[in-house]
Image (cartoon, rainbow, N blue to C red):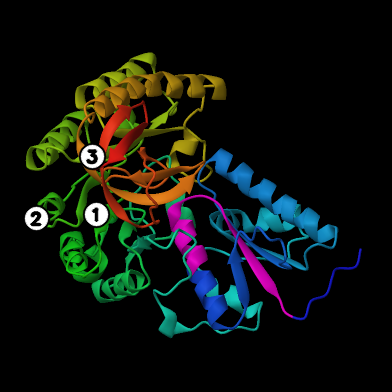
Amino acid sequence: MKTRTRQKDKVSIITLGCSKNLVDSEVLSGQLRANDIDVVHENSRLDHNIVIVNTCGFIDKAKEESVQTILEQVELKKKGKLDKVYVTGCLSERYRNNLETEIPEVDAYFGTMELPRILKQFDADYKAELVGERILSTPSHYAYMKISEGCNRTCSFCAIPLMRGKHVSKTKEELVAEAKRLVKSGVKEIMLIAQELTYYGLDLYKKRALPDLLHALADIDGLHWIRLHYAYPSKFPLEIIDVMKERDNICNYLDMPLQHASDAMLLAMKRQITRAEMTELIGEIRSRIPDICLRTTLIAGFPGETRDDVEEVKSFLEEHRFDRVGIFTYSHEEDTSAHDLKDSLSQEEKESRAQEIMEVQQEISYEKNQEKMGRVFKVLVDKKEAGKYLGRTEFDSVEVDNEVIIDTKEKLKNGEFVQVKITKAFDYDLEGVIV
């Protein structure tokens, strides 16, 4: 079928996977827009003729979603509804040769660090002066900010270093300038992301420089909340907690993926930490900021995991009572050191273990939310949905944590801060009234 013709190209970018991918898509959008190319994130009007799929290659489910999305876009191209389909991101970086063979209808595949090559498809130039500038796909009052790329860790289950390369920090000056631009555009909350936050600066400054960066960002007028995601526990620099305690606009919130609690599993995962060391670290963090919100992620079904290992995870959660927990089932990844281990558990058994662990956490989450009843929290309004305003406290990040349902007849604006007294508490959400 003949493809349709247009006077001017319009690009829709579909982003899959993590917030780091989202930032990459926003940067790509900024570069395209600077070259006078019409671009939209996941265009709902469907009046575009070119699609760029930014893929995820982290675990099996993410890979499947990426492949399915590519196939859907290729089908639209076959029907004449699209002129071009391009694919970039982690899946394309890791499996480009396979994808080119299996889905040849895609016009071009690109890796994670090939932005200039993508732009050449549009006869566009990479504009170095735009470094840090992007078109936000998030609501205008919050944004993710990537402080580094890649990872030097050697966790046995993780393929991210294969897709993203070695750790490379952005300079402090570049990040402060980027944050100032975001605040000037209306952003009130910035979420710092990286494959490994605490490694920041070791390559540039020969020391862990995240505390210095946090002080510089906290000095920015109009930046109300700074939130930390993806902090590795081994050799965790406790100066981060001291800065958090000292600066009011750094949220008392830390996302620290631990992955397991059994020493046998932590050793097999090459996490460079023991359960006792994690316990000591958590105790030290909470001694400095007692009301800090600790979020972690875990893996269920790693090769060799026994029932005793699962029980250790459950007892660890009961001991430390994390505020937020996410859990993945183990995915057998080629070219990782764990790939040589026998993956003997069925997917059903992995999911059953994950559910068992999350049932423990669900009860903890309910009890922790019940403790918030009657208290007043500063809440950032995110959106209005089904006639209700939804927001978050400083202890809640976007999409993965609690939402606060605000019971009010007042007209609120997205990005507005309000004081909310909690009147109802559920497993994962809160409800309250403005005071």
In the image, 435 versus 98, the foreground residue is: 435
Cα–Cα gap, marks 3 and 2: 16 Å
Dot 1 or dot 3: first in sequence order is 1
Q: SS class of the residue under badge 1?
A: helix
In the image, 415 versus 248, the foreground residue is: 415
| Residue 246 image label | 2
Labels 1 and 2 touching (C-beta < 8 A): no
Q: Amino acid at mark 2?
A: Glu
- In the rendered image, residue 211, in percent from the top left (x then y), is placed at 16, 60
Residue at the spot 53% in from the left edge and 70% down from the top edge: 28
Which residue is denoted by mark 1 in the rendering?
198
Please give the count of numbered marks on the rendered protein. 3
Cα–Cα gap, marks 1 and 2: 18 Å
Q: Amino acid at mark 3?
A: Cys
Which residue is denoted by mark 3 in the rendering?
293
268 part of magenta stretch: no
Q: Residues within 10 Å of mark 2 (few under 14, many from 20)?
A: few
User: Looking at the image, which residue sits at the far right?
Assistant: 1
Instruction: Residue 305: tell me if it is visible.
Output: no
Boundaries of the magenta span? 8-26
Residue at the spot 61% in from the left edge and 71% down from the top edge: 39
Rendering quarter of residue 268:
top left
Q: Residues within 10 Å of mark 3 (few under 14, many from 20)?
A: some
The quadrant of the image that shows the N terminus is: bottom right
Dot 1 or dot 2: first in sequence order is 1
Residue at the spot 54% in from the left edge and 71% down from the top edge: 29
Labels 3 and 2 touching (C-beta < 8 A): no
Residue at the spot 36% in from the left edge and 68% down from the top edge: 186
The quadrant of the image that shows the C terminus is: top left
